[in-house]
Amino acid sequence: MPDLTRTTPINIVFDLDGTLIDSAPDIHAAANKVFTANGLQPFPFAVVKGFIGNGVGVLVSRLLQSQGLAPTGPLQSDMVAQFISLYEDAFDLTRLYPGALAALDGLVAQGHRLGLCTNKPAGPARAALRHFGLDRHMAVLIGGDSLPQRKPDPAPLLAALAAMGPGPALFVGDSEVDAETARRAGVALALFTEGYRTAPVETLGPKLIFSDFATLPGLVSHLAPRLLPAL
């Protein structure tokens, strides 16, 4: 049987926070710095982590609302700008998930094309890729401010795939937002179970499930023939 992962490359798009990197500690620290700088109360880690996934604007809105404040308006806009400025180069508490870089190396060696689709703003996302040495593998980056729409709207994922060229597609994510994005885009989902998901795995409809990045290249090799169109 021919090696389909080489003869027919798969376009594999990754989420970032909770999928390739565990950035929740730095997001928590940045949120608390912004809120205390504005005379507001800080948050426990679990509260901030639970609001991650829909972008900075939604995160700040949810945190404001949890303190009984208006989720939109000048204060929210100012705090979003403060958060982005503070967070763009904040990597002291962020870590790459074990095996993630080696997995990307393996996928590229198999002939696949890789891209990124995240609700993190493009500037901080690009900085994170550079910091962890992931940027060399990503053919395209779609951030939370690259388009008017953000995940779970399918437009960002579809834009990333369009930029990568024709071919079978796979979206690798960790959360309910990623699952809905994949479903609405009609793209198969590979679910990383060690991220920020709270819903049961079986409710998210993944084509493959993994908890260890060392297994991902092999799982993709087995899945690839099923992503090819019927001849």
Image (cartoon, rainbow, N blue to C red):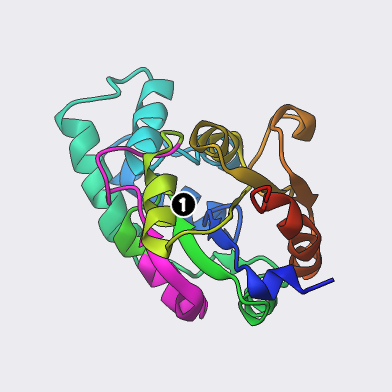
Q: Nearer the viewer, residue 181 or 118?
A: 181
The residue drawn where x is 27% and y is 45% is 147
Question: For residue 145: magenta?
Answer: yes
The residue drawn where x is 74% and y is 57% is 225
The location of residue 161, given as percent across then percent down, is 44, 55
Question: Residue lying furthest left in this view?
Answer: 74
SS type, badge 1:
helix
Write down the quadrant of residue 3 in the picture: bottom right
Q: Is residue 62 left or right of residue 206?
A: left
User: Does 151 sit above or below residue 122?
Assistant: above
Q: Nearer the viewer, residue 140 or 168?
A: 168
Q: Nearer the viewer, residue 175 or 179?
A: 179
The residue drawn where x is 71% and y is 40% is 206
**Numbered range of the magenta stretch:** 126-151
Disc 1 marks which residue?
Answer: 27
Question: Residue lying furthest front in this view?
Answer: 231
The location of residue 57, given as percent across then percent down, is 32, 38
Crowding at mark 1 (Cα within 10 Å: few <14, some 14-19, many 20+): many
How many numbered badges does the structure rendering display?
A: 1
User: Does 119 sit above or below residue 66?
Assistant: below
Question: For residue 136: magenta?
Answer: yes
Question: Residue lying furthest right in this view?
Answer: 1
- Quadrant location of the N terminus? bottom right
Q: Is residue 73 left or right of residue 15?
A: left
The location of residue 214, given as percent across then percent down, is 79, 70
Give the amino acid type for the residue marked by disc 1 in the picture. Answer: Ile
User: Does 109 sit above or below residue 43?
Assistant: below
The location of residue 140, given as percent across then percent down, is 39, 65
